[in-house]
Image (cartoon, rainbow, N blue to C red):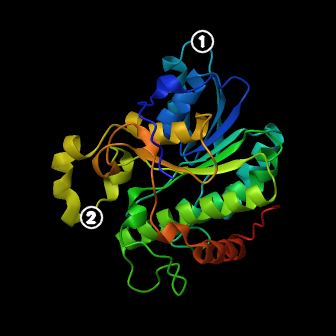
Amino acid sequence: MVSNDNHTWSAADIPDQSGRTVIITGANTGLGFHTAAALAARGAQVVLAVRNLEKGNAALARINAAVPGKPDVTLQELDLSSLDSVRRAADALRSNYPRIDLLINNAGVMWTPKALTADGFELQFGTNHLGHFALTGLLLDHLTAVRGSRVVTVSSLGHRLRAAIHFDDLQWERNYSRIGAYGQSKLANLLFTYELQRRLQAAAAPTIAVAAHPGGSSTELARNIPRLLRPLNALGPLLFQSAEMGALPTLRAATDPSVQGGQYYGPDGFGEQRGHPKLVQSSAQSHDQDLQQRLWAVSEELTGVRFGI
């Protein structure tokens, strides 16, 4: 159901986050950085889960400089393209944070040339979906121990673009398409969110799963834009909003007290490209329960991670 709330939601609407522990993947730049900075400014204990510790330290310093007082921000090394790294990071996070209020699955790659993860998965599917699937499963019991906890996964308008789950060739070993592989990974983010929410609800868990998308946002993700689409960069100011604005749907999904499990937030402007966050609808395909359950089973098999719900 789409909200009829006419309120223009902004970062000023984020409730006090004091006492909450937040883990954000890919928080050293772009959407993740602005999400982390906003939550730290509202008092959350924020963990920047990043692949590159040098860039992570730079982001941490920027947040410390921008947020008054002494924000509680730390780093955790995490490479979502390696299941070994995901497991090491999860072990460290479980040890350091017995309760987790909020996991934001934000990190991602887009439209990359054909490449494989350390485990032999197509890079976009392996990083954007399988890495986050594994991380969430490994941390879930520390989330379900906390009333009001949330898992927020960042999808994209790309979940509609040439998007399908290619069960006969999940790793794109035949006829690789940058755009198609990205669409598959972003559709997978939504299928995962909706199936996770159904399982959490069935288990009467105090945790909800929510999704968000940033619309068209100006971030480093666009560095791999295909040659044919590069003329669109000249229209950037018209097509894309700032990363700070693009982070608002994630922030609303993460903090708005009215958010319910299984909802999806995106910009309120034309085509959901720009604007303030509102409740939006994802594709009909993303709500296909057979697809959700089939992808879940395949993801468990590929990652070796089973969810305790």
Residue 34 lies, in percent from the top left, at 47, 33
Residue type (three-letter) at the residue carrying disc 1? Gly
Q: Is residue 134 shown left or right of residue 281?
A: right
Which residue corresponds to the image point at 78% horizontal and 60% vertical from the top-left?
A: 202
Circle 1 packing at 10 Å, graded few (<14), some (14-19), many (20+), is few
**Residue on which disc 1 sits:** 69
Compared with 291, 249 (above or below) is: above
Residue 164 lies, in percent from the top left, at 46, 75
Compared with 141, 249 (above or below) is: above
Compared with 68, 83 (above or below) is: below
Q: Which mark is residue 15?
A: none
Q: Is residue 30 shown left or right of residue 289?
A: left
Residue 112 in view, yes or no? no
Foreground residue, 264 or 109?
264
Q: Which mark is residue 226?
A: 2
Image quadrant occupied by the C terminus: bottom right
Residue 170 lies, in percent from the top left, at 53, 79
Foreground residue, 108 or 11?
11
Which residue corresponds to the image point at 51% horizontal and 72% vertical from the top-left?
A: 122
Question: Callout 1: helix, strand or loop?
Answer: loop
Compared with 303, 214 (above or below) is: above
Which residue corresponds to the image point at 61% horizontal and 77% vertical from the top-left?
A: 290
Estimate the spatial distance between the alpha carbons at disc 1 and disc 2, rounded to whole Å. 43 Å
Of all residues shown, which one is farthest toward the top?
Answer: 69
Residue type (three-letter) at the residue carrying disc 2? Pro
Foreground residue, 96 or 245?
245
